[in-house]
Image (cartoon, helix red, strand yellow):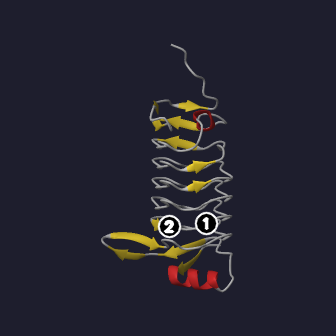
Amino acid sequence: MVWEITTEELLKRYTSGKRNFAGAVVVRKSECGRNYIDLEGAVLRDINLRGADLSFADLRLADLSGADLFGASLIEARLDGAIIRDANLQCVNLCGCNLTGADLVGISWHHANAIDAIFRRARFSGGGENNVFICADFRDASIAHDAICRAMNVIWDTIMPDGTIQNGPYFGEWKSISK
């Protein structure tokens, strides 16, 4: 079920104890010619945002620990420095999302669309499966090269943690090429 809610109402309901915002489309304000959702620094632990639309949201420094973001749309969202520990990121759309310095330790991460996503200096405890990493940026992220290039992930023109670029396209298990 899709339904609309303002950021103010979402925060008010969350503070009063409500945690289920599945399918919510957060109503956007238009400022500076760009639509955005202002949730910078919000504490939204254990929130259910399954299928929610948070495209263009400003979630910098937000605490989304334990959040259920299954199927959520975070297109071009700002999650710089956000805490997203132990969250469900299955089937999430992170297209153009900025996760610079985000804490992604313990996430469940499968079937995610991370085209043009930025994971610079992000912290991970492992990789996921069946994700799409096209033009993604993992520079200085705490994730192993093989955790990105495995498990049926699609890799194409993606910057690895060491700064090298995997041009690809690669699908499935990445094989190192000896020179």
Locate residue 66: give its quadrant: bottom right
Residue at 68% over, 76% down: 19
Q: Residue furthest top?
A: 179
Residue 70, given in percent of the width and then of the height, sits at: 65, 60
Pointers 2 and 1 in contact (CB under 8 A)?
Answer: yes
Task: Tell me the amino acid under the disc marked 1.
Answer: Leu
Q: CA distance from mark 2 to mark 1?
A: 9 Å
Q: Of helix, strand and loop, which one carries label 1?
A: loop
- Label 1 CA crowd tier, 10 Å (few <14, some 14–19, many 20+): many
Amino acid at circle 2? Leu
Residue in the image at 69% along x and 83% along y = 17
5 or 79: nearer the eye?
Answer: 79
Task: Tell which circle, 2 or 1, labels the residue nearer the N-terminal end.
Answer: 2
Name of the residue lying farthest toward the left: 32
Q: Toward which corner of the image does residue 24 lie, by quadrant?
A: bottom right
Q: Along the line of sight, which residue is nearer the eye, 125 or 55?
A: 125
Name the foreground residue: 86 vs 112. 86
Which residue occupies 51% across, 31% down? 169
- Residue nearer the viewer, 156 or 177: 177
Q: Secondary structure at mark 2?
A: loop
Q: Measured from the top left, where is residue 149 in percent x and y? A: 59, 34
Q: Is residue 136 above or below residue 149?
A: below
Residue identified by numbered label 1: 64
Q: Which residue is mark 2?
A: 59
- The percent coordinates of residue 6 (x first, y second) are 51, 81
Quarter of the rendering occupied by the N terminus:
bottom right
